[in-house]
Amino acid sequence: MTDNCNKCSATAPINVALIKYWGKRSDELNLPAGDSLSLTLSSLRSTVTVAFHGDGADDLYDVVGDPAKARRVVSRFRELTGIRQGLRVKSENNFPGGAGLASSASSMAALVTALAGLAESMPSEQQLAQLARLGSGSAVRSLLPGYVLWQAGQDLQGADCRARTLYPPDHLSLKVIAAIVDEGPKPLGSTAAMTLCRDTSPFYDAYLESSKRDLRLLRQALEAKEFAALAEIAEANALALHAVSITARPPVIYLKPSTLRVIETVRQLRADAIGCFFTIDAGPNVFIFCLDRDLERVKGRIAGLAGVRDVLVDGPGGEAAITQEHLF
Ligand code: PMV
């Protein structure tokens, strides 16, 4: 990039996993225990602005949620670049603050992209992904467009832990609806919950094994554009994440009664030949993938359910990008 840019903004979209990342092989390096596969969305985004504000000054964080993740990324960025000036970091989302959609992936992807704009030489894609991963593992997928495979690898330092786009955003003609049923904070954050599941759920190892199989089958379905198979596998994989969470000790129960109502309705719609399926992250809200042609019907049914507070519609989309650089 340039050597006299001292303020930079970048934006990155959220991504939704079809095969979930749930468990780490290294807590310290934030390396996943298994491979995951997601779709990067288009409009639901975080924007992060970083700016120098004086030599040796303390960093200032005005960010959505806990600043600890951003601090970890910034501190590693300093080690890599030798930059000593204090930084101001500001993040915002273009979706309602309390919508209950996790934004750590999009905000960490936007953060590293903005930081790259401040560096004298552009870090490599792999370095950016490693930086983003320290803040949020799933952020590596928000750096890339379309259907993204994030491979866990085996190297102890994570050299072979990489993400790549398998298919562009337009591989399938679909939309993604976020059904918001609860806007409050989660009972337990994903990092703590993953550790608890690994250490206490009797089903954790079985979960990792079945996830490998899910990934293999889902990749075949995606390649062949077989929507029905995609639907069955993605739903089963999401429910497996919740099965392993519910069986942790103490249990981590993210699902609410209204979550179950959405699940049931999506399955009814599919039985009526409407092209849709659900997936759920570590929270009560539901993402519904549906064929373009069925969007209005699915949206109408879901929006009318008791307990559904909002429905946000997005589509497959692009990667993180710098939006503004200020040169002095
Ligand atoms: O990246 P993290 O640490 O916020 O973990 C996200 C994990 C899930 O969203 C639950 C699943 C996934 O693959 O995105």
Image (cartoon, grey):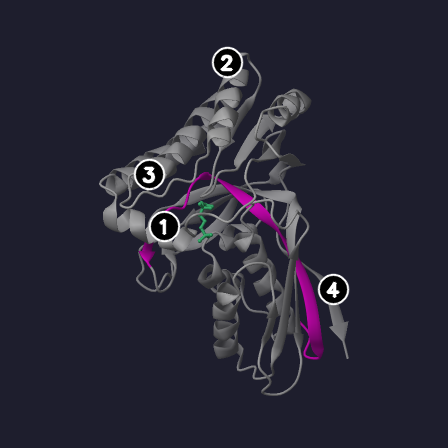
Q: CA distance from mark 3 to mark 4?
A: 44 Å
Q: Quadrant of residue 310?
A: top right
Q: Position of residue 129 (x, y in %)?
A: 50, 60
Give the main secondary structure of the magenta stretch.
Answer: strand
**Can residue 98 be found in the magenta stretch?**
no
Q: Label 3 sits on what residue type?
A: Ile
Residue on which the image places disc 3: 246
Q: What amino acid type should be assigned to the residue bearing mark 2?
A: Ala
Instruction: Tell me what residue is drawn at x 60 percent, y 83 percent.
Output: 85
13 over 314 or under it: above or below: below
Query: Who's the residue at 61% across and 76% down the image?
Result: 87
Q: Residue furthest bottom?
A: 55
Q: Secondary structure at mark 2?
A: helix
Looking at the rendered image, the disc whose residue lies closer to the viewer, 2 or 1, is 1
Mark sitting earlier along the chain (3/1): 1
Residue at the (50%, 13%) spot, across then down: 271
Residue of label 2: 271
Q: Tell which tag, 2 or 4, sits nearer the viewer.
A: 2
The count of marks equals: 4
Which numbered disc, 3 or 4, marks the residue that appears first in the sequence?
Answer: 3
Question: Spatial distance from mark 4 to mark 1, Cα to Cα?
Answer: 36 Å
